[in-house]
Image (cartoon, rainbow, N blue to C red):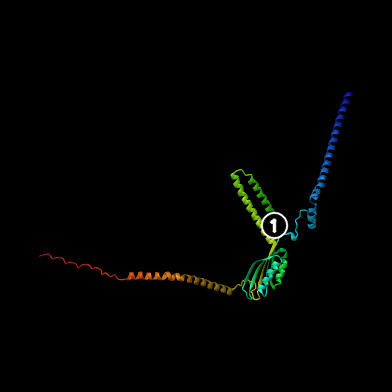
Amino acid sequence: MTTMGAGMDGQVGRRRGALLAATTLAAALALTGCGAGDSGAKDAAGSAPEAPAANGGEAGRDAAAGAPEGAGAGAPDLRVDQRAIIYTGTMRVQVNDVDSAAREATAVATRVGGFVGGDQRRSADADAVAELELRVPAAKFTEVVEELAKLGRQQSREIDTQDVTEETVDLDARIASQRARVESARRLLGRATSITDLVSLENELGRREADLASLEAKKRRLADLTALSTITVSLAGPRAKATEEKADTGFLVGLRGGWKAFVVSMTVLLTVLGALLPWLVALGVPLAVLLVVLRRRRKAPALVAPVSAPPPVPSARSAP
């Protein structure tokens, strides 16, 4: 009994020792894994910022210097001088000499690097009006407007701006994507092995190149509008009529408009009648003569007398 109890106690002790050793090993492995994970995370966190700093430190410092305070690393540049803005202006200036003022306005535009896009003039007396369309660099837009206002007495001015920054950025992205699609189609075309594939890929390449050309044309148009602003200036003489006033309403206004419409209608009618009169004379006179001759022939009496019936013959009387 004593020997069996001692054996059982020895087995229980060995089991407890094995269980304790297994628990200790598991705890050690867990601690080792946690330590490795923490060190890996620390290494990743510490080395990740260092790679961009090593590769593009100068670019990062330049961006940080130009970006506004509080902006993140990927924040867009919102400065006005970095945005795409279209400036358009319309103004009317009353001057003493329209031709002289038009020459001065042209000189102002050419002096800042612009040009005259359109020139329309009416009359040559004191009521003359000249309308000039000036294209000037966007940076000189305000300066040119102020100089044009000094040519005489400014009567009106209207300035409009349109921000097309987002549209420009979108066009750039679409152009880059479309160029990649064109290059992909060209590579596939170079590896075509059958006539069917060749024709299909050529058509696809043509469509992609046409889309790319359209996008590039839009980009050039936007670049032109943002680089050169448009100023439409009207130079009016001393006796030129002011800008058109609002249309009046009322009975007299309606009567005046109706009379004008009646006169115009009669003028058109008489014009059409005058154009048709030579044709009526040339065709109507012979036709009228022909109708008269035909009518007289129908009414003329017959030349041959009608044949009368023979007298009745008396019947012979029979002998008694």
119 sits to left or right of 32: left
Circle 1 residue: 168
Q: Is residue 12 above or below residue 123?
A: above
Quadrant assignment for the N terminus: top right
Q: Nearer the viewer, residue 269 or 16?
A: 269
Q: Is residue 23 above or below residue 2?
A: below
Looking at the picture, how far across and down is residue 148, in whole percent?
70, 70
Quadrant assignment for the C terminus: bottom left
Looking at the picture, how far across and down is residue 138, in whole percent?
71, 63
Q: How many marks?
A: 1
At x 60%, y 46%, the residue is: 198
Q: Nearer the viewer, residue 202 or 234?
A: 202
Residue 162 showing in the rendered view: no
Q: Residues within 10 Å of mark 1 (few under 14, many from 20)?
A: some
At x 66%, y 49%, the residue is: 183
Q: Quadrant of residue 16?
A: top right
Looking at the picture, how far across and down is residue 219, in whole percent?
67, 57
Q: Nearer the viewer, residue 35 or 88?
A: 88
Given the current orientation, which residue lies at the most extreme right position?
Answer: 2
Q: Quadrant of residue 316?
A: bottom left
Residue 274 showing in the rendered view: yes
Q: Is residue 111 above or below residue 175?
A: below
Q: Nearer the viewer, residue 251 or 171?
A: 171
Q: Is residue 33 above or below residue 274?
A: above
133 sits to left or right of 254: right
Q: Disc 1 marks which amino acid? A: Thr
